[in-house]
Amino acid sequence: MRRRTFVQSLVASGLVTLASSKGQAANYQVSLRFLRPPGSLSEEEFLSRCIRCGKCGEVCPNRCIKYFGMENGLSSLDTPYIIPREQACILCMKCGDICPSGAIQPIEHKAEPIIEKVKMGKARVDTTLCLSYQGKTCGVCYRACPLQDVAIKTGMLEQPHVLEACVGCGLCERSCIQIPQAIRIIPNHDRLET
Amino acid sequence: MNKVRWLVLSSVFAMLVLLPFLHLYQSYEAAHAYDLLLPNEKAISDSMEWLTSPFIKDPEKDLNQLKGTTWSGTLFGYKMSDPLAVVGQIAASGSVYWPFLLTALIPILLSIVFGRFYCGWICPATLIYELNDNLATWLRKVGLPIGRRKLDKRVKYLVLLVGIVLAGLTGTVTFAAMYPPAIIGREIYYVIALNGFGAGMIFFLLTILFDLMVAQRGFCRYICPGGAVYSLLGRFRLLRIKRDVSQCNDCAKCNVVCQFGLDPLRDNFSQECNNCTACIAVCPTDALSFTVNVKDIDYQGSGHLGHQYRRQQEQNSEKELA
């Protein structure tokens, strides 16, 4: 009889789980400024898909992918992140290929699919800090951008203007010679939907 | 056979240590900056080049064929994942991602045939737990109190269930933080390629303490959610250890050596057995061997080479004479 009640309770709690997982509300809040690897699903979906295997960081040739400890809450423990000022993504798309769980979707290593699907964030220029806006011709961020004239263009005195196609790889933020950096990636945590 | 198993266990563990170094080597190669490396980085780069150059041509690309850990790895281009990871993901996301489920197909099929073989033959935590258990035996000889409590084996199914419920409630794959093989692979990678141990190491040390102070191999036997999945998968496994009653002499060495606290002497292996072959290796009369069978055999009585059986035979023959 004990065995039967045990099995019954197993089934009952399984049903409770299924019911509760359906009715989840989006309650994710961001306190740190970080990026997820290119091709990541929207934050909530990413957390439910990622199995924390660490292969994305292991395959990253630029070693920009690092892993959270407790600092971003328990739910993102051991999940990958990128701080573009420390080391930015070079859009090689190897992490999406290696990811087994589908948390990072595979994207072809070509300009069009990358511009279309990668939505890590968007660069924003702080004109009070940017040298070019202060009259000292710079243009480093424009030259660091892998999608020149598509994601960023320059005007007078190499003043950068970020365009709609910016994927948020962070190479501009990484390369900015101003301290603190005058161009920053504003992370986009809605990213892809399945 | 047991020595082969130790070889497999330690080579899996060695791979886990090697792969982060290969990752470092690969990133140095990708940067084309050998001259800028620090002396210790140059040493890593040189030794890894020496190790891999006979097998691959372009380290930057070819090494991608070999990545990850036992939790989820890419083995010569084929992705393989732990069934527990799939269970965790389905519970957390409430949907099935088919490409991921397929990566767990080979482990699942192997578990259906071989039972909990993963626990005994591959799991990198098993290597440490078994060494830890040898340490426990030694500590016991010295006279320190070592816990040998017996708990309910079904606790681990409860842990599996609680993990599934938690995954569903929080929307994250909770098993990744409470499953030793996943933790070990990750922590080795962190400590070699990134900046030191993460939070999982504390959990792993706690499980080692649990094994020492509460129950022998307690985590694997009573708590491990992955062990629970493998036990369930291997419930009707084909490969089982069988006792040949005509060879057995009731020495009970198999019962002593079994770290999972099973009872090979009474033919009672059940789904908990991880086919580790320790009992086969220790048997002095070669009475234990693998068979292909879907069910365990019931208790066959005392061994034919033992005193008890011989006495019974004598009594029977005396009765026949009388």
Image (cartoon, coloured by chain):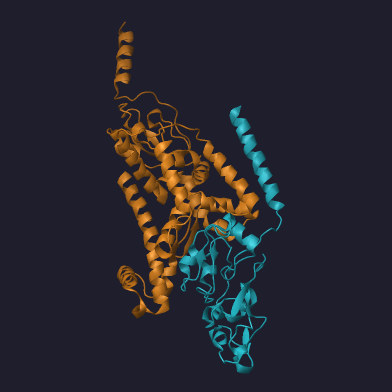
- Residue B97 in view (yes/no): no
**Chain letter for the cyan part:** A
Instruction: Looking at this view, name the residue that lies furthest to the left.
Output: B284
Q: Nearer the viewer, residue B206 or B247?
A: B206
Left or right: B106 in relation to A21: left
Quadrant of the drawing holding the C terminus of chain B: top left
Give the residue furthest to the bottom: A156
Q: Is residue B12 above or below residue B320?
A: below
**Residue A119 left/right relative to B67:** right
Q: Position of residue B283 (x, y in %)?
A: 30, 34
**Residue A134 visible in rendering:** yes
User: Which chain is displayed in orange in the rendered image?
Assistant: B
- Quarter location, residue B194: bottom left
For the point 55% across and 40% down, which residue is it? B157
Q: Residue visible at 58% across and 46% down?
A: B163
User: Image quadrant for the N terminus of chain B?
Assistant: top left
Position of residue B154 measured from the top left corner of the image (x, y, whole percent): 53, 36
Q: Residue B130: which quarter of the image?
A: top left
Residue at figure coordinates x 34%, y 45% from the top left: B131
Residue A58 screen position, x and y as percent: 46, 66
Q: Which of B68 and B83 is in front in this view?
A: B68
Tell me residue A133's x, y (percent): 62, 88
In this rendering, is residue B81 above or below A189?
A: above
Residue occupying the far top of the picture: B322
The front one of B57 and A32 is A32
| Residue in the image at 33% along x and 13% along y | B316
Q: How many labels does the image show?
A: 0
